[in-house]
Amino acid sequence: MRLAAYSVLVLAAVHSSGSPALAQQALRWQTSGVQQVAHEAPAKPRLKPKAPTAFIKPNVTRAIAEVPVAAQALQTPARDAGAAVRQAAVQTAAATPQTINPVTPVCYQNCGPECGCGMPAMTGDPSCGVMDCGEPTCGIAYGEDCGCGDVGCAGSCGGTTGNCVSRGAIPVVFFVPPIQELQFFGGVQAFKGALDATRDRGNFGANLGVNIGGRMSWLPWPGLGYQIGYRAASSQLHGSDIGNTVDPHTQSFFTAGLFHRKQVGLNYGVVYDVLKDERIESADFGQLRGQISIKNPRGHEIGFLFARSLNENTLAGVDYQGVDQYLLFYRVCGQHGGEFRVFGGMDDDSMGIVGGDIDVPLSDRWSLQTGFSYLIPEEEDGGIGAEEEGWNLGMGLVWHYGKRARSGYGSPYRPMFNVADNGTFFVDDRP
């Protein structure tokens, strides 16, 4: 009873002092033997980090040295174990010796660091430790793995042809200018010229071709366009009674050049034409063709055309060359596409030249092209005059890529010239 009263007095004194710690200590000395315990969750045991597994590369000349950092990571608390393991792995890799496995001379040639020494062998022998680029007796033969100065890179011992910038080799990159207009055409033609010799007969046949136009981005010239085209023609479909020829004769025309076109203002261009004719013998003719004109806002255009022969050919004892042409023309352009042109002039021998052409869109993809030209001889009718006469008549359909049969007329990069034919490339004999 006295002990209980004493305990109460002690607790009251401690409580009045304001020290919970003393009150907690006093409870532990109660005669009941009951000890006050704090109700807290037991702390989780800390686990030691697992030591990183070290993979030892077989057949290494020296063993990998132990890294003190790895051992230190085992004693690092759990929250720092990940960073310590990563640091240990980095230092382990840095401490690994960078030596090459000992291999036989057949498998390995010491070609220096530029050859990629130490790469897996390609000989099929698993014991080989480096690549064999070529002949076993040479260091490196050829291929992408050869470096400048490597032995055997030319295919034989001692050659040096692999990846050598110092040899002056410059890579070549081909760049194609953008294509704005792509046209495929085909139709029929009839013509007559000096290459028909003494025959007072014409030629009839069909032709197919392509004409491409676009912006010439190779040159720093604002608004400059380019064009390139080809035409293949086959005539006299049933042969000829001259020389008892049963096969039709063929012609090939090639046109390429530059031009500058505006909807209103000055337009100009020049192209190079090539004709390969098989009528008498196989012969190639070349000419330079150009145009300069002025166009007003209403679509009326006047200008000058010319063609200049560049070579001549001797066929069956007679000299032939292209006819030099000097022409004036007038063209009217429709508001919704289409063009009509007439022209006239003469050649350098005072022979007259007249003609005209029409280009009309039929739909978004198709247009119709037709035209004629006539070379007027200066000789009297009959005889020599009949031989020197020349003419061409053509008609065909044009398919426009991208449905640009109508909208293409407003493009500044639409081809300015049609691909050459027997009306724009007359051939005449020279005395």
Image: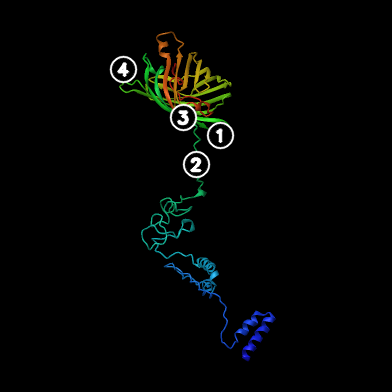
Instruction: Give amino acid for label 2.
Output: Val
Decide which of tag 1 and tag 3 comes sooner along the chain.
Answer: 1
State the quadrant of the N terminus: bottom right
Give neighbour class at mark 2: few <14, some 14-19, many 20+ (Cα, 10 Å): few
Is 327 positioned to the left or the right of 27 in the image?
left
Decide which of tag 4 and tag 1 comes sooner along the chain.
Answer: 1
Give neighbour class at mark 3: few <14, some 14-19, many 20+ (Cα, 10 Å): few
Instruction: Give amino acid for label 3.
Output: Lys
Tag 4, which secondary structure? loop
| Distance Cα–Cα, label 4 vs label 3 | 45 Å
Image coordinates of residue 16 in percent, x first then y, are 69, 81
Residue 171 visible:
yes
Decide which of tag 4 and tag 3 comes sooner along the chain.
Answer: 4
From the image, tell me which residue sits under label 1: 219
Decide which of tag 1 and tag 2 comes sooner along the chain.
Answer: 2
Give neighbour class at mark 1: few <14, some 14-19, many 20+ (Cα, 10 Å): few
Tag 3, which secondary structure? loop
Say which quarter of the image contains residue 136.
bottom left
Image coordinates of residue 295 in percent, x first then y, are 57, 21
Residue 232 visible:
no
Image coordinates of residue 59 in percent, x first then y, are 42, 68
| Distance Cα–Cα, label 1 vs label 2 | 16 Å
Tag 2, which secondary structure? loop
Give neighbour class at mark 4: few <14, some 14-19, many 20+ (Cα, 10 Å): few
Please state the total of marks drawn on the protein image. 4
Which residue appears at 58% of the width and 88% of the height? 31
From the image, tell me which residue sits under label 2: 173
Q: CB atoms at circles 4 and 3 under 8 Å apart?
A: no
Q: CB atoms at circles 2 and 3 under 8 Å apart?
A: no
| Distance Cα–Cα, label 1 vs label 3 | 29 Å
Closer-to-camera residue (327/379): 327
